[in-house]
Amino acid sequence: MNGVSDEALVALAKAGDRRAFEALVSRHYAAIHRFSWRLCGEAAEAEDVAQETLIRVARGISGFEGRSAFRSWAFGVAANCAKDAIRARRRRARTLEAAAVAALVEPACAVEHDDGEAGLWDAVRDLPDGQREAVMLVHVEGLSHGEAARALGCAEATVSWRLFAARRRLKSHLSRASA
Amino acid sequence: MTERDLEKLKRTQVPAPSDGAKARALSAAMDAFEEAQAEKTSADADRRLKGNREAGRLTSTGPIGGLGPWRAIMQNRIAIGGAAACLLAVPLTAALYSQYGVPGAGVEGRVEAPTGDRSVAQIDAEKRDAQDAVAPKPKLEDKAKAGAGLVEPQLAPPVASAPAESLAAQPLTREAAPVARGRVGVAAPSFMPAPPPADMRQAEEDRDRFAAKDQNGVKIAATDPVSTFSIDADTASYSWTRRSLMQGRLPSPDAVRIEELINYFPYDYARPERADTPFRPTATVMPTPWNRDTKLIRIGIRGFEAAPAVRPKANLVFLVDVSGSMSSADKLPLVKASLKLLLDQLRPDDSVALVTYAGTSGVAMQPTKASDREAISAAIDSLGAGGSTAGAAGIEEAYRLARKNFDPKGVNRVMIATDGDFNVGTSDDDGLQRLIETERQSGVFLSVLGFGQGNYNDALMQRLAQNGNGTAAYIDQLEEAQKVLSEEATATLFPIAKDVKIQVEFNPAAVSEYRLIGYETRMLAREDFRNDKVDAGEVGSGATVTALYEIVPVGSPARLTEDLRYGAPQAPAAPTAAKADEYAFLKMRYKLPSEDVSRELSQPIGRAQEEASLAAAPDDARFAAAVAAFGQKLKGGKYVSTMGWDEIAALANGAKGEDRWGYRAGFVRLVGLAKALSPR
């Protein structure tokens, strides 16, 4: 299946070919995991999100029309999964606030990066859902505004606007943090 | 905050997923996929039961105006949610099967029943539900939104009617299916636009995998006088080509390996007298049928034919792929019939074991003496197809049995019968190749018997056979099994030499250019010739192997390359009188099956072997030339443009010789088919 294009694999998978589907998700797992990790910032959760993404992709592939690249579409699905995961985490965090919140994050798995970057990431993950997704797809994964819009299911102008709003918000957030 | 500041985000290192995370995710995804497919399939079956009325409508809907309603469905579907989306795709598949009758391809999904075990996905879902039960319930719209996110989110749900919403809120499980089917199953067919897109049909049919390899190019004898390759006694490519043509399709050029076409046919070369010189090369030089200014050098070898009485004992392990993909009539049923043909060729004290592989691999029958034919026959009969393919585990198991029962004086051989569709376990081709290479050290030979089409993996089969002291044959019909496993059983089972390599040194005084026809996948480096570590092909008892070179004699107008401006002009370098008559010098190296040190044979090829005209050349040589022309034409005909299909057929027809089994007559018919199918 190496060398077969994503489009062909998608067509086969839609027709029920499990081998093609397996090749397809196997090919993109690393990217989906990376994307999930960046959204969650935490190893165990990222793996769960990546796995959930593959499951949803498996169930949804027959409805995928190929309006965007498969990978962009999968990112869109992953963004949804991450949204759910983060929401669930916040719920948990509220109930567990008294307990050690730190236990949720495994320090061993956390990646060390310089302070500016870590702060930026925290700020990005704190953005409202739409803005965070736009930043992730465009600035992190390098999709065009149009492609990101197709992945997220909104208008291109919406993506551009969300990016603008996100940058404004990040700026104020970071200047507050450093002050 | 500028865009550049955000560039930082891209550079952040992300730790790799933990061990097994990918495997877990993939297996969960496959379970979910299978479940979704099973849902689709049950809806499909429902529709079939309703009879032809709807099927008729499915196919009769014209292309005009087809897109509009389809769009409408697409949009409705979003509102209905993921489960219904799966069902809606069903008419498409149904149309595909009914209109194009695609056999094999895609059938897997229908054959494999959903597993009874709780899948990872299900367990996960339950875990999540439990979590949700503790935590406050998420709002309904959230789930609905998540569901819509699955399908193309770009189309915002336009018809958010109440029932649709409640459906979307359902988790995508089987329970949702009947409801959705009630709503959609009836409405969908009448909207169904006609055929699926052409590119998809194409993909359905051509999932057979072949490794691409360009034809060998022209070499200049003065600068590059040595040509080295491994012999190739495989025949798989011929039967594949035949099958394609019989079905009315020209084979893909990558599927045609000219040497395998030529070597499919037995030739009457001189026999060696004794087993310790296992073969004798026969060389002929004759005019090229497709170019009157060049010559063909034919090198033929014939393996020593062991008399049945002195034949070594055979320790065979049949490794049979019984995965779901093997269930069609041209696969497992043909495998069974073929293996029984082979049983008839065995002697009472030969031993046979049977290993199967599918989801799990297992020993279907411990090594059993061939005298107990009934037990073996019954074990073969009881094989049934189901599950996915764990090829690597099966191969390991088969080799383990072969080693356990190893007979140092006999022939120990694993015979794989498969469509090459290994998709579980060590499924990457490199991993399998390494496994085979390791097992080769144990002295066990390998035969690869390919079956079926639709997802035939020729590339992998070739790699296994080439790296595992083995040969590959493709069985497209019982007649072919008859040839490989019955008439040529001794050649298939009993090697008389292994790692057979050929090195030809051309005499620049007589030859200006040369080109090896075929053997593209078998080329070796010049230094590999004497290196006994480098694997090469084996020759079976009584088998014949042929190689053809097209040479341009010095002074011939057919020369394709020109002299270099800055190099010395190409001129005969005053050869010594004794060698002036030689075109080339042939060297062959081989090992006896039980030895690890190679031996060498050599002989000059010169005017002494030359035939002045094509008509004077032996039948075998002319026939091989015709097959070579045929193969080259199927590969694009770069060098044989002057020769038409009719000329090839005429040449072959006049060179049929005794043709005891009718193979050559069959070839002439194939040429006619190729002519009819090729674009004019």
Image (cartoon, rainbow, N blue to C red):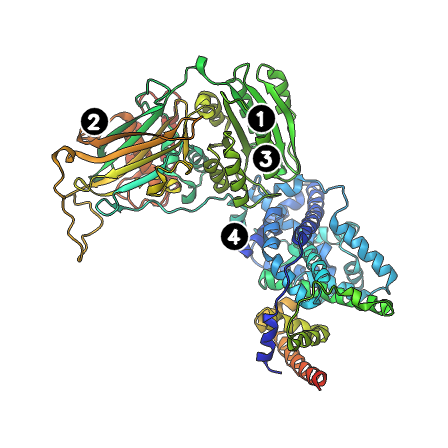
Taking depth in this image into account, of B16 and B308 the one nearest to the observer is: B16
Q: Chain of mark 3?
A: B
Residue B336, label in figure: 1
- Say whether marks 2 and 4 touch (CB < 8 Å): no
| Labels 4, 3: one chain | no
Residue, disc 2: B616
* Mark 2 crowdedness (10 Å alpha carbons): few <14, some 14-19, many ≥20: few
Q: CA distance from mark 2 to mark 4?
A: 49 Å
Give the residue type that dot 4 points to: Val
| Labels 4, 1: one chain | no
* Mark 4 crowdedness (10 Å alpha carbons): few <14, some 14-19, many ≥20: few
- Say whether marks 4 and 1 touch (CB < 8 Å): no
- Say whether marks 3 and 2 touch (CB < 8 Å): no
Element class at badge 1: helix
Pick whichever of labels 3 and 2 is earlier in the sequence: 3
Pick whichever of labels 1 and 2 is earlier in the sequence: 1
Taking depth in this image into account, of B450 and B509 the one nearest to the observer is: B509
Element class at badge 3: helix
Residue plotted at (66% across, 41% down)? B110
Image quadrant in which you'd find residue B163: bottom right
Residue, disc 3: B396
Element class at badge 2: helix
Residue B219 visible (yes or no): yes
Give the residue type that dot 3 points to: Glu
Give the residue type that dot 1 points to: Lys
Residue B669, label in figure: none
| Labels 3, 2: one chain | yes
